[in-house]
Amino acid sequence: MKNTVFTPSTLALLLACALTLLALSVLLPAFDDAPVSRGSRSSPGSFSTSAIGHAGIYDVMRRLGRPVRRAVSNTLATVGSRGTLIVAEPDLRLIKSEDGLRLLSAPRLLLVLPKWRGFQDEDRPAWIGEVMPVANLNPQQTLALVAGQSWVIRKEWPKEWEGNELPFKPSGSGGLVQLIRSKELRPVVGTEEAMLVGEMREGRNRIWVLSDPDVMSNHGLGRGRNAAFMVTLLDALAATDGGGGAEAPIVFDETVHGFQAAQWSPMKLLFRFPFAVVTALVCAAALMMVLAGTGRFGVARRSKRALDFGKAGLIANGARLLDYAGHHEVILRGFIRLTVRSAAAALHAPGGLAGKNLIEWLDRVGRSRGLKTSCSDIMRDAFDKHGKNAGGLDRLYKNARKIYRWKGDILNGSGTSRVNRK
């Protein structure tokens, strides 16, 4: 571990970061339901906060407790049989596609005709830097999808609305208003010559067409009573023919603005019943495996010593057993006596000598060989006259070392003992 580039704490941090990134790479795609846009959020739509967007009316309805939703896939399934669908200023190419035309079969539909085309601000992507009216052919072709014998006209905003089935009046900016002339639509809000809101019935389905989006766009929603007008309009449409209710959704379709759902991830199955049970068991097993293996990290464990059947191993084992038994004093006294008898035998001491006489003979031999330490001094320091330890265990250790050095000196000459003399 001392030769590694990173410290253990740095390695642990790097490993934690790697595991976190791995977990996020798995979990984020599995729970990502955010829409994927092919266009700009500065265009019309309930995601757009630009002047011509519809995020304002969506937020107003949500704050009022209406069950509003955005759909980026499976729109008709989200609407159901009692819901209300809002297709506001659709892209003509997308609404004319097979999926777009299918939206027109919703049980309650509000179709808002396009009027403006915005150009994104380069500095603020959510804003529009420039806006211009779309060609009259665009809303005309959109209207023709539900009412063939109808026309779109643009004229000055009327001062009064002669026909209005709603309790609030829409307000304009004073410019041109976009209206509908049609024999197929019944006026809900309009003047004598044209209508702002028209209704068409096809069986049990109800289609309302709002000709001018300015009354619901972000830039016009706060003008006059437009917010109240739009809330009343949506509530009235949602309530027709048994629709509406606390759970009946009001759905803003965003597929006609180029939004689509994120690609479905097979990883979602891992977190849905019954597969979630298997996922939990696998995670628990992985955690147990990691916990079981954590002891193997770090410095390698020392392998256990193999059994030594030689003399050295036998002596070492015997010493450990004697040390464990605690007979230190007995062993040391025996070692001192045995060392003295061994030295006497090596020097061929006269037979019959023992005890004090043998020690005096060894002292004479030691003096003749120039030894400064005598055997009798060591024995006297180690034992009293009764043969018991007089100085404790430490003194016995000290005298055991002395008697060993003394034996080496008397047999081989002074200073030849290999024992450490410190």
Image (cartoon, rainbow, N blue to C red):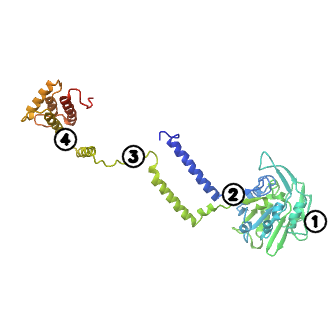
Task: Tell me the SS state at disc 3.
Answer: loop
Query: Pointer 3: what residue?
Result: 302
Give the mark, 3 or 4, whose residue is nearer the N terminus. 3
x, y percentage for residue 195? 89, 65
Q: Residues within 10 Å of mark 2 (few under 14, many from 20)?
A: few
Q: Which residue is found at the position 75% from the left and 59% from the top?
A: 259
Question: Which residue is nearer to you in this view: 263 or 154?
Answer: 263
- Look at label 1 and name its amino acid: Glu
Q: Are marks 2 and 4 in contact (CB under 8 Å)?
A: no
Query: Pointer 1: what residue?
Result: 193
Q: CA distance from mark 3 to mark 4?
A: 33 Å
Mark 1 vs mark 2, foreground winner is 2
- Look at label 4 and name its amino acid: Ile
Q: CA distance from mark 1 to mark 2?
A: 44 Å
Give the mark, 1 or 2, whose residue is nearer the N terminus. 2
Question: Which residue is nearer to you in this view: 124 or 206?
Answer: 124
Q: Are marks 4 and 1 in contact (CB under 8 Å)?
A: no
Query: Pointer 2: what residue?
Result: 34
Q: CA distance from mark 2 to mark 4?
A: 84 Å
x, y percentage for residue 243? 74, 71
State the mark number for residue 331: 4
Give the mark, 1 or 3, whose residue is nearer the N terminus. 1
Give the mark, 2 or 4, whose residue is nearer the N terminus. 2
Splitting the image into 4 quarters, where does residue 320 fall?
A: top left
- Look at label 3 and name its amino acid: Arg
Q: In the displayed structure, would residue 82 be above or below residue 307?
A: below
- Look at label 2 and name its amino acid: Ala
Q: Residues within 10 Å of mark 4 (few under 14, many from 20)?
A: few
